[in-house]
Amino acid sequence: MSMELSTAAPDAPAVADDGVWLACVACGETFAPFETVRYTCDDCDGLLEARYAEPPTWAEFEASEVDRGVWRYAAALPFEMGVSLPEGDTPLHEVPRLESEIGVSRLRIKHEGMNPTGSFKDRGMTVGVRVAKELGVDRLACASTGNTSAALAAYGGRGGMETLVLLPAGKVAAGKVAQAALHGARILEVDGNFDACLDIVQDLAERGEAYLLNSLNPFRLEGQKTIGFEILEQFRDEEGRFPDRIVLPVGNAGNTAALYKCFRELVQSGALDEADVPKLTGVQAEGAAPMVEAIENDADEVRRWDEVETRATAIRIGNPVNAPKALPGIRNTGGTAVAVSDEEITGAQRALAAEGVGVEPASAASVAGLRKLRDEGVVDDDEAVVCLTTGHLLKDPDAAAAAGNDPESVPNDTDAVLAHLAGER
Ligand SMILES: Cc1ncc(COP(=O)(O)O)c(C=O)c1O
């Protein structure tokens, strides 16, 4: 394994602001981080990432004034504090029945659905909205399969800023639309899929009409990178070792890119041995699996899928914009990618729920993927694995109700209730 795409140059370039700058992952060009609004490289249009003169150490995190959550990791972020609700500090659940059924040495579930708006997106928004304030913009916008819009609406509202969200009409789970509505976002329903919504938001951003807070924005991924710090700290405290593998659902591939960056920064500071870097393993739905296709074909680029379909609406994405960052993340950590059916996703959602962990369909893809890779012998039985569950069950109440037990009507009478219970189900 080689940790390519180093996160820091030996010396901070002249454009660095307080030891932070933006670098193009394609051509290496560097830019001042907060002078002007910029999402991609001026020279080659490549993706940008934040870089720091000093990569973070565990000691810095332990000395942090904030003892938990995203801002505990401020030493690895561009600011000391952001617009916070607060976020992060999500549980790492034990799931003993699933662990023995799947057959790995240890299985833990990192439940990002326990963030303030019910998904991991809050980690990115707390940093992204802070940067928006630094840049002095007033209108925030995103395209969304739902969770980004809920987080943007809440954090934008908290920050006192105008928010605009573009959603694929009829394809966003009810809980997420309700959140965006109540937190005060202006909701535009587009007659197209997520990728079409993102194309429009990128156009709006280019024309200076709004500040884009999708994961194309490099600062969103800075916040999401803290999932990795937290998993490693929680897992190490518990077991004295790091996980061998992290399995996660993949849509736009932001988390895959963010976790890889987390590992690279820790390797760079000496806080993590290269040999201990967990294998990043991405899971997509069969009807929306361009990343899996690229990994299976050993391709350098992802082919855009124009037609995508899955019950896991949060990962109904055909053109993962972070692929240039995420593909090396999967390959260089020795991980892989796998596609699962909607039935496998629902089965995993039920299995998690049976152990008290309530997640939305896209989140359950991680467990469905692990199950499949274990069945295929790709994952060994001695591996310690963390599955990331990205959103809460209540985000998609219709999917939860469809996957769960049907309510049974009973008469308004205790004896009749007992008779009903004694009868056939
Ligand atoms: C619940 C959930 N899981 C997974 C994803 C995909 O995450 P990423 O774009 O980081 O691959 C999303 C993104 O929209 C999501 O809302």
Image: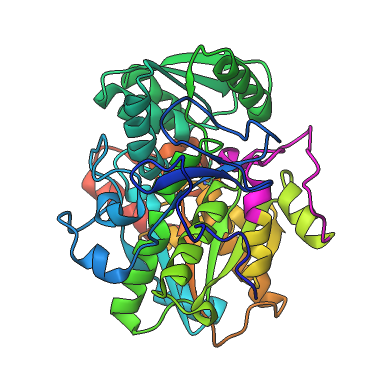
> Can residue 401 be seen?
no
Q: Is residue 313 above or below residue 381?
A: above
Question: Which residue sits at x=61%, y=59%?
Answer: 5
Out of 69 and 367, give the one closest to the viewer. 69
Q: Is residue 44 above or below residue 274?
A: above
Question: Residue 56 location, x and y as percent?
Answer: 35, 63
Q: Quick check: 330 left or right of 19?
A: right
Magenta run includes residue 325: yes
Question: Which residue sits at x=60%, y=48%?
Answer: 253
Question: Residue 116 location, x and y as percent?
Answer: 29, 41
Question: Which residue sits at x=58%, y=65%?
Answer: 280
> Can residue 122 be seen?
yes
The residue stretch that appears in magenta: 298-326
Q: Quick check: 258 left or right of 112?
A: right
Give the residue at the far right of this rendering.
297
Question: Which residue sits at x=62%, y=44%?
Answer: 322
Question: Residue 395 location, x and y as percent?
Answer: 42, 38
